[in-house]
Amino acid sequence: MGAKIKYTIFSKNADEAIDIKNKIIINTTNVEELEIDISINEAYVFY
């Protein structure tokens, strides 16, 4: 079991945030260890 990896994404719109999130997931070998926080124009979404 590896360490938890946390990313915080700040974006202008939802499409940009989804693109960034997908790039992170594609390049990650163990998705279960990911935690991604997304902030869109001051709004907060937890993935």
Image (tube, rainbow, N blue to C red):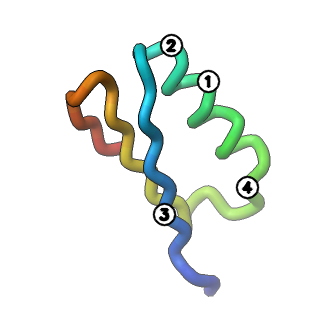
Mark linked to residue 15: 2
**Which mark is first along the chain, 2 or 4?**
2
Q: Are marks 4 and 3 in contact (CB under 8 Å)?
A: no
Name which residue type carries label 1: Asp
Residue indicated by mark 3: 6
Name the one closer to the observer, 19 or 30: 19
Measured Cα–Cα span from mark 4 to mark 3: 12 Å
**Which mark is first along the chain, 4 or 1?**
1
Name which residue type carries label 3: Lys
Which residue is painted at 61% across and 57% down in the image?
31
Q: Secondary structure at mark 4?
A: loop
**Which mark is first along the chain, 3 or 4?**
3
Q: Secondary structure at mark 3?
A: strand
Residue 32 versus residue 16 in the image, above or below = below
Residue indicated by mark 4: 28
Q: Could you say which quadrant of the image residue 16 lies in?
A: top right
Q: Are marks 4 and 2 in contact (CB under 8 Å)?
A: no
**Which mark is first along the chain, 3 or 1?**
3
Mark linked to residue 10: none
Mark linked to residue 19: 1
Q: Are marks 2 and 1 in contact (CB under 8 Å)?
A: yes
Name which residue type carries label 4: Thr
Measured Cα–Cα span from mark 1 to mark 3: 17 Å
Which residue is painted at 42% across and 36% down in the image?
10
Q: Can you give x and y, in whole percent of width and height, for residue 36 in the image?
A: 45, 50
- Quadrant in which the C terminus is drawn: top left
**Which mark is first along the chain, 2 or 3?**
3
Which residue is painted at 73% across and 55% down in the image?
28
Name the one closer to the observer, 3 or 38: 38
